[in-house]
Amino acid sequence: MKQFTFLSLVLITGSSLLALTPPPVRPKPMKLVKVWETDTTLRTPESVLYDGHNTLYVANIDGKPDALDGSGFISKVSLDGKIENLRWTSGLNAPKGMGLYKNKLYVTDVYRLICINTENGQAEKTWDAVGKDGFLNDVTVAKDGTVYVSDNRNDKIYRLKDGKWEVFLDGEQLNKPNGVLAVGKDKLLIGSTKIGALQSVDLATKTLTKLADGMAATDGIVPEGKGNYFVSDWNGQLFHVNADGTKEQLLDTRAEKINSADIDYVAKKKLLVVPTFYRNSLIAYRVE
């Protein structure tokens, strides 16, 4: 009888201890809180780029995305959403992606890449796409100054390194690359719009690895930190992609027909800035 009582006590005590064990803590879901929106004097803003100080550069297509009409321009916007210089530099066609290195702003302009001096807004040099019907889209610059550019229609990635302009990658495996982001010395991230995926390229072997998918027309890719990224779907979605490839949807404005094109993230203010394309504005959200 005593043995039964003792065993019962052990079983009951063990059960109680198990019951008191707290469940694992799940990370709090991210959310976006709208902070500001510019006025609508922008004209089909496709891309926004933070200069690391107090300015956002905005690429305005102002027409058809492939028109050679000379109506495109770059604007300067403050971090509180004020348009400081609407036509800081003009005479472009349909500017899209941008990348910054020192005082050089690299901008795609349909069939060419343009280097603009940020001190005076003047174009210094251009590089043309190889072959006909080039449709250069996004730009990223590695820490050593190497520039990578996507050709969305022709499944190509260009590279400008040490003054040499060349096709670095090409082929159907790129699946219509739009957004590009250089990560460290050995990796390039690509947003493949055809399959709605974020892919990683090993720069040494040129091997592609799919990190996440299910994101429709992937557009902008920006780092959030610790190997995590924000990714936009041009149709109006924003995603947070974790280092392990899991993702969560942060925003969906498709029903309102508000696009989310080539985004940027101002880490010091936790601001995610979104060009709305046809809505002709930038919208900034605080990441919480």
Image (tube, rainbow, N blue to C red):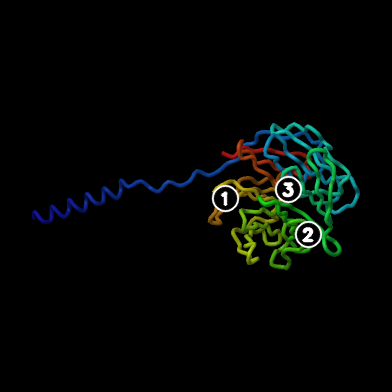
Q: Nearer the viewer, residue 5 or 276?
A: 276
x then y, percent, for residue 67: 88, 52
In the picture as drawn, the residue positioned furthest to the right comes out as 69
**Residue sitting at x 21%, y 53%:** 11
Amino acid found under the numbered disc labelled 1: Asn
Amino acid found under the numbered disc labelled 2: Trp
Of tags 1 and 3, the one toward the viewer is: 3
x then y, percent, for residue 5: 13, 52
x then y, percent, for residue 30: 55, 43
Q: Residues within 10 Å of mark 1 (few under 14, many from 20)?
A: some
Circle 1 is placed at which residue position? 228
Quarter of the image containing the C terminus?
A: top right
Mark 3 in CB contact with mark 2 (< 8 angstroms): no
Q: Residues within 10 Å of mark 2 (few under 14, many from 20)?
A: some
Circle 3 is placed at which residue position? 99
x then y, percent, for residue 188: 65, 57
Which mark, by number, is residue 57? none
Q: Quick one: SS at disc 2?
A: strand
Quadrant in the rendering for residue 111: bottom right
